[in-house]
Image (cartoon, helix red, strand yellow):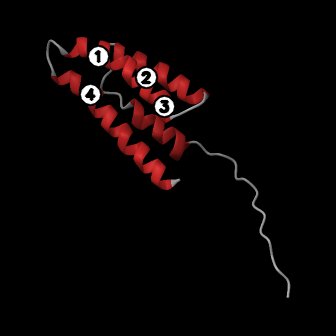
């Protein structure tokens, strides 16, 4: 599970960097965001399945399509929310003990 988390983190960083790179291109950058926004939304929903993935994909689409918001690291924030900040209740564990 930890290996999956690390791969997800690295992928998220890469997608955030690609999304932020369009800011560096003066004239063409905003038009590239029109292509990048749906792709980023699709990747977000694939990386985080379920309801929170759908919500995050809508948020990343809006963030990428709006001008000036490319500096928000949406993929990294979603990773932090999913694996670091969100406290899930502990699941009870059954420990079997053998008697001699």
The residue at 69%/48% (across/down) is 89
Question: Which residue does the numbered mark 4 point to in the structure image?
Answer: 20
Q: Nearer the viewer, mark 2 or mark 4?
A: 2
Could you tell which of marks 2 and 4 lies nearer the N-terminus? 4
As drawn, 61 above or below 11: above
In screen coordinates, is 66 left or right of 21? right
Q: Nearer the viewer, mark 3 or mark 2?
A: 3
The residue at 16%/24% (across/down) is 24
Helix, strand or loop at label 2? It is: helix
Pointer 2: residues within 10 angstroms few (<14), some, or many (20+)? Answer: many
Hey, which quadrant is residue 38 in on the image? top left
Cα gap from disc 3 to disc 4, whole angstroms: 20 Å
Residue 21, image x, y percentages: 22, 27
Question: Which residue does the numbered mark 2 point to in the structure image?
Answer: 41
Helix, strand or loop at label 4? It is: helix
Pointer 3: residues within 10 angstroms few (<14), some, or many (20+)? Answer: few
Q: Residue furthest bottom?
A: 100
As drawn, 84 above or below 68: below
Q: Nearer the viewer, mark 4 or mark 1?
A: 1
Residue 99, image x, y percentages: 85, 83
Could you tell which of marks 3 and 2 lies nearer the N-terminus? 2
Cα gap from disc 1 to disc 3, whole angstroms: 20 Å
Question: Which residue does the numbered mark 3 point to in the structure image?
Answer: 46
Could you tell which of marks 3 and 4 lies nearer the N-terminus? 4
Q: Which mark is residue 33?
A: 1
Q: Nearer the viewer, mark 1 or mark 3?
A: 3
Could you tell which of marks 4 and 1 lies nearer the N-terminus? 4
């Amino acid at each position: 599970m930890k290996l999956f988390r690390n791969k997800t983190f690295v992928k998220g960083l890469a997608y955030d960097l690609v999304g932020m790179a369009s800011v560096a291109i003066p004239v063409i950058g905003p038009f590239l965001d029109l292509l990048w926004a749906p792709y980023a939304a699709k990747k977000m929903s694939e990386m985080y399945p379920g309801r929170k993935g759908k919500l995050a994909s809508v948020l990343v689409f809006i963030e990428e399509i709006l001008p000036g918001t490319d500096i928000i690291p949406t993929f990294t924030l979603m990773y932090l929310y999913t694996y670091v900040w969100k406290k899930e209740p502990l699941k009870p564990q059954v420990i079997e003990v053998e008697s001699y």
